Image: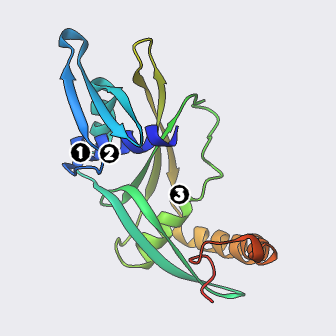
Amino acid sequence: YAARGTALNELVDARACHVAGEHPVKYRNEGDEGGVYTVDIDTFSIDFAEALVEQTAAWVQGMTPQVYCEADIEVRQGTVTLYGYADYVGVDEVVDLKSTKKYSPDSRDYSEHWQHRVYPYCLVKSGMLSEVSRFVYLVAECNANKEGVVDGQLFREPYEVFVYEYECQLRDFLSYELLPWLDDHRDMITDTKIFND
């Protein structure tokens, strides 16, 4: 399912922001039914309904895709560097594209995720943006039809951004939860970027 999300991101980047992805894309016109985009990813192909791609692209039109952001935060153990790629960045808005099989609009499924805290913090603290007022999870509920073409419905899960409040939340989470857990499991962690020893 991760490949489906990657493929959709690349199609939206190409349609909304004119940025080519790393995987080959083909398009076939299906007449009145609209077209189908095919993305070759890993060892298989994924077909997407043109309507889903175009509708998703319309939400992020004019935004900058795949923006790398990074900023340091001081915690009781020292300095931690937070970083990542924000899917789409506008003047004062960040959008993260998610794809899932099932989404409940009233559930706030992504409230516990950290992207809506980390990316605005990094963008503002690094000086890339003067402010971020809104973060939106753009959720594509994707399912394949009997022909194997992925189509679906779009939902928006918006969050107001409070960078300084997020800074406190991030500092507490890192200091009292994540860093102690990482230290306790240091012998099991092989990613050399985690510890800057």
Coordinates of residue 103 in the picture (x, y in percent) = 57, 30
Q: Is residue 190 left or right of residue 12?
A: right
- The picture quadrant where one finds residue 15 is top left
Q: Nearer the viewer, mark 1 or mark 3?
A: 1
Q: Residue at x 37, y 44 (%)?
A: 9
Q: Secondary structure at mark 2?
A: helix
Q: Quadrant of the C terminus?
A: bottom right
**Residue at the spot of label 1:** 14
Classed neighbour count for the residue bearing mark 2: other residues with Cα under 10 Å, few (<14), some (14–19), many (≥20): many
**Residue at the spot of label 3:** 116
Quick check: marks 2 and 1 in contact, CB under 8 Å? yes
Instruction: Depth check: give the residue in front, 126 or 44.
Output: 44
In the rendered structure, find residue 102 and report the number of the disc placed on it: none
Q: Residue at x 29, y 24 (%)?
A: 51
Q: Which is nearer the N-term, disc 1 or disc 3?
A: 1
In the rendered structure, find residue 10 and report the number of the disc placed on it: 2
Task: Name above or below for residue 93 compared with residue 48.
Answer: below
Coordinates of residue 3 in the picture (x, y in percent) = 46, 41
Residue type (three-letter) at the residue carrying disc 3: His
Q: CA distance from mark 2 to mark 1?
A: 6 Å
Quick check: marks 1 and 3 in contact, CB under 8 Å? no
Q: Is residue 46 left or right of residue 117?
A: left
